[in-house]
Image (spheres, rainbow, N blue to C red):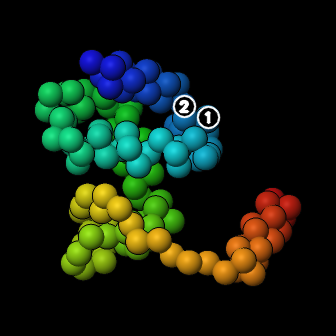
């Protein structure tokens, strides 16, 4: 029942604002959405009916809004299990339980950090 309580807390918070942190999409949404978004759509644990996830209207709205974001769509295409990239992105297919580790050179990581820092400074 702890998950049901957490879903209720999440739903009440999302009744007050569009996203968890307020009016803007933040790291909080990025961290919470994969697990609770999938749970809200009944994609994990086959517990959707038991938890009555459809009752959490604000969580459903939030889950749908994040799933429509272009970056989230691209990420879901990359993390698909099998099949057509576009179909998996649109249908809400479950993610793989483990994703292959990608090696990134230290110079690539530094470049990504620099790009991110420059982007944040320009905002």
Q: Is residue 66 left or right of residue 104?
A: left
Q: Residue at x 24, y 61 (%)?
A: 93
Badge 1 marks a residue whose secondary structure is loop
Residue 3 quadrant: top left
Instruction: Report if the CB atoms under discs 2 and 1 are less than 8 Å apart.
Output: yes
Q: Is residue 3 above or below residue 117?
A: above
Residue 89 percent location from the top left of the image: 32, 67
Q: Earlier in the sequence, mark 2 or mark 1?
A: 2
Q: Which residue is mark 2?
A: 17
Q: CA distance from mark 2 to mark 1?
A: 5 Å
* Image-quadrant location for residue 95: bottom left
> Measured from the top left, where is residue 120 in percent x and y?
79, 60
Relative to 7, is 121 above or below? below
Badge 2 crowding class, 10 Å Cα cut-off, few under 14, some 14 to 19, many 20 or more, is some
Which numbered circle lies on residue 50?
Answer: none
- Please state if 110 lies on the left or on the right of 11 as rendered: right
Position in image of residue 22 (x %, y %): 61, 34
How many dots with numbers?
A: 2
Q: Look at the image and tell me whether residue 97 can be seen.
A: yes
Instruction: Please give the name of the residue rendered at 30% of the width and 22% of the height, measured from the top-left corner.
Output: 4
Question: Quadrant where the N terminus lies?
Answer: top left
Across and down, in percent, residue 50 comes to 14, 28
Q: Residue at x 30, y 62 (%)?
A: 96
Q: Nearer the viewer, residue 121 or 17?
A: 121
Quadrant of the image containing the C terminus: bottom right
User: Residue placed at 53% from the left, 49% from the top?
Assistant: 30
**Left/right of residue 121 with respect to residue 8 in the rendered view:** right
Q: Which mark is residue 22?
A: 1
Answer above or below: position of 68 versus 8: below
- Secondary structure, mark 2, is loop
Is residue 119 visible in this depiction of the protein? no
């Amino acid at each position: 029942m702890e998950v049901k309580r957490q879903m209720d807390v999440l739903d009440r918070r999302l009744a007050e604002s569009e996203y968890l942190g307020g009016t803007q999409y933040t790291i909080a949404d990025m961290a919470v959405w994969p697990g609770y978004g999938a749970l809200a759509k009944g994609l994990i644990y086959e517990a959707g009916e038991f938890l009555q996830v459809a009752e959490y209207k604000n969580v459903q709205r939030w889950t749908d809004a994040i799933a429509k974001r272009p970056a989230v769509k691209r990420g879901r295409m990359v993390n698909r299990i099998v099949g057509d990239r576009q179909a998996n992105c649109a249908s809400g297919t479950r993610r793989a339980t483990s994703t292959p580790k990608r090696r990134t050179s230290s110079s690539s990581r530094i470049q990504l950090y620099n790009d991110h820092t420059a982007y944040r400074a320009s905002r």
